[in-house]
Amino acid sequence: MNGLRRSLCLILLVAAGLAGCGQGEKGKARVWVTRDRGATTLEQKSVPAGLTALQGLYRVAQVETGYGGAFVTKIDGVAGSRLHQRDWFFFVNGYEADRGAASYRLRGGDLEWWDYRSWSGSERAPVVVGAFPEPFLHGYDGKRRAAAVRFGPGLRAEARALARVVRARSLAPIGRPVAAAANLLVVTAGRPGLVAGLRSGEKAGDPVRFVVSGRAFARELARDPALVRQRYQAAEWSSS
């Protein structure tokens, strides 16, 4: 009996250790908490990889939950409101999360972003640009996709610089086929800006399509990918 008891204790200790260290995940993840589509930053800190997204949020902010802990109702005293049609939205590496924060395990390099905004009359945002160069670098749920860059006439140099940022192995003029499962970044002329959407599918982790427009803006973004930090889209770019 003593031997059996010791064996059971050892199993429980190992299981607890795995749970505590996040199944062996190494590195750091980042957590952002903002308001109004990133207009105001409330929190911005690093947490250990291996935590759930909810555990990561608890590390950086005061949090209240509902529905048995499955739904975040309040962060730093700011509560969702049906009356005012405002709530907390949760992204990982630029993707709108497809599960509760307690069910998502953070990997090294992940970017967890909570934004409090109105949902009245607003379209769903399945992917946003404010975590760029995510999701090209770390994907979603530990799954990364190959990246391809395509460019318009005279924009090869800018496209090559951005290909280095998103670690793309495929670089070619617009019109060259792109694998259906790849993330795509397109560099074009026109009004400066960056917009993003899903190439196909409708859930987190599906292939994305980012469009960078404007030669000067493409160069700036390659030099400083944080240029569009915490923005949903930068359709017509201004530095203000």
Image (cartoon, grey):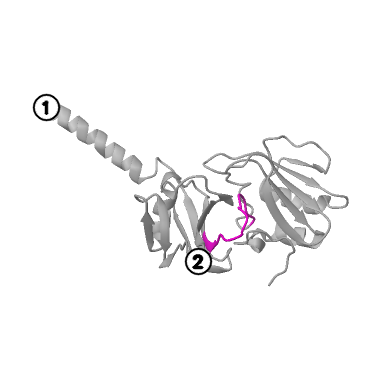
Q: Is residue 93 visible?
A: no
Q: Is residue 173 visible?
A: yes
Which residue ends up furthest to the right in the rendered image?
153
Characterize the magenta stretch by its predominant secondary structure: loop
Q: In this figure, which residue is indicated by the disc labeled 2?
A: 84
Q: Look at the image and say whether residue 194 sits in the magenta stretch.
A: no
Helix, strand or loop at label 1? It is loop
Residue type marked 1: Met
Q: Image check: 34 left or right of 164? A: left
- Residue range (magenta): 115-129
Q: Nearer the viewer, mark 1 or mark 2?
A: 2
Query: Quadrant location of the N terminus?
Result: top left
Tell me: residue 41, above or below residue 103: below
Give x and y (percent) for residue 154: 88, 52
Q: Residues within 10 Å of mark 2 (few under 14, many from 20)?
A: few
Q: In this figure, which residue is indicated by the disc labeled 1?
A: 1
Residue type marked 2: His
